[in-house]
Image: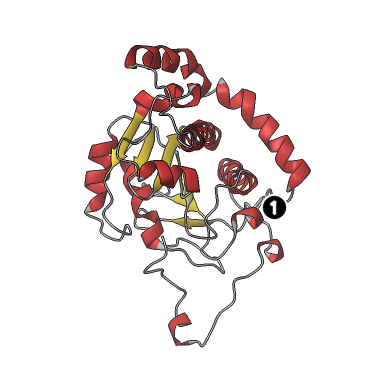
Amino acid sequence: MTAQMKAPTGIDKAPGFSIPDPLDLPTLKGKISDEEWKLRCDLAATYRLASIYGWTDLIFTHFSVRCPDEDGKARFLINPYGVLFDEMTASSLVKVDVDGQVVGDTPYFSNPAGFTIHSAVHMARQDAHAVLHIHSPYGVAVSAQQDGLKRLTQFAMVVHDDVAYHDYEGIALDHDERERLVADMGAHHFVILRNHGTLTVGANCATAFLRMYFLEQACKAQILAQSDTKPPREEGPEMSARVMQQGSPAFVPGLGDNLAWPGLLRRLNRLKPGYDV
């Protein structure tokens, strides 16, 4: 989100400020737990992969992952405001509390408004360790269509019956919206935010990314199919349910993520290395 960002103390009095280059930061490797470092590397990789797949909106959307709780308090990792997806690093990610306020030392600041949606999902769903939210042109286009995602393709049928919808309420600044979002989402793993974008969750970054890949492919194919002068052919609910059942192993942790994620990381290391510093 783009509004009501929280800047470091005193920045409102300065005529301007600069965002540090992530590659200039000292690494946190060895200074934090191995578990947190692994989460940081996976989340930074997710951001950079999203840039490769064109799922970016400059700095105006967010991915987050839940860290191990500290002193009984929930902690999350999210992108620092002002750092582009393709330059994200493990050490540049900021740790925030459930209200999106930065915890610990960092030269960056966060945008608490950008964490409103994420905090709602993380806190309501114990299985939602990773939350991805994007504003891609195809996803936004489908979110603006009256009938939402249709059963036009195999991509769509794999996810269709697991998609929830949440009506647009403006930029997510109102914490009261969190309750309505959680109620609309229920137990679903995919959300189309009307007139806004798409969201997926997963037990880890790999699963959430794979879900977003299928949802984005479904949205893209739908918009392309609708370019014909004749209405596209849509399958019925029975076929859709069958395809969803057939494709469901792709999203089981330890199965689909272990098949796709290592290859994605290899691709990332070829095209855009440096996220794991």
User: Dividing the picture into quarters, in which one does residue 164 lie?
Assistant: top left
The residue nearer to you, when weighing 30 against 91, is: 91
Q: Position of residue 147 (x, y in %)?
A: 31, 35
Which amino acid lies under the numbered mark 1 shown in the image of this protein?
Answer: Val
Q: In this orientation, which residue lies closer to the viewer: 25 or 139?
A: 139
On the question of residue 66 being in view, the answer is no
Per the image, label 1 sits on a secondary structure element best described as loop
Query: Which residue lies at the image location 38% right of the left edge and 67% below the top edge?
Result: 3
Q: Position of residue 166 (x, y in %)?
A: 28, 43
Q: Decide: is 103 above or below 235.
A: below
Which of the image's four quarters has the N terminus? bottom left
On the image, numbered disc 1 is attached to which residue? 277
The answer to whether any part of residue 270 appears in the image is: yes
Q: Which residue lies furthest to the front in this view?
A: 229
Q: Where is residue 74 in the image (x, y as percent from the top left)?
A: 38, 48
Question: How is the protein colored in the picture?
Answer: secondary structure
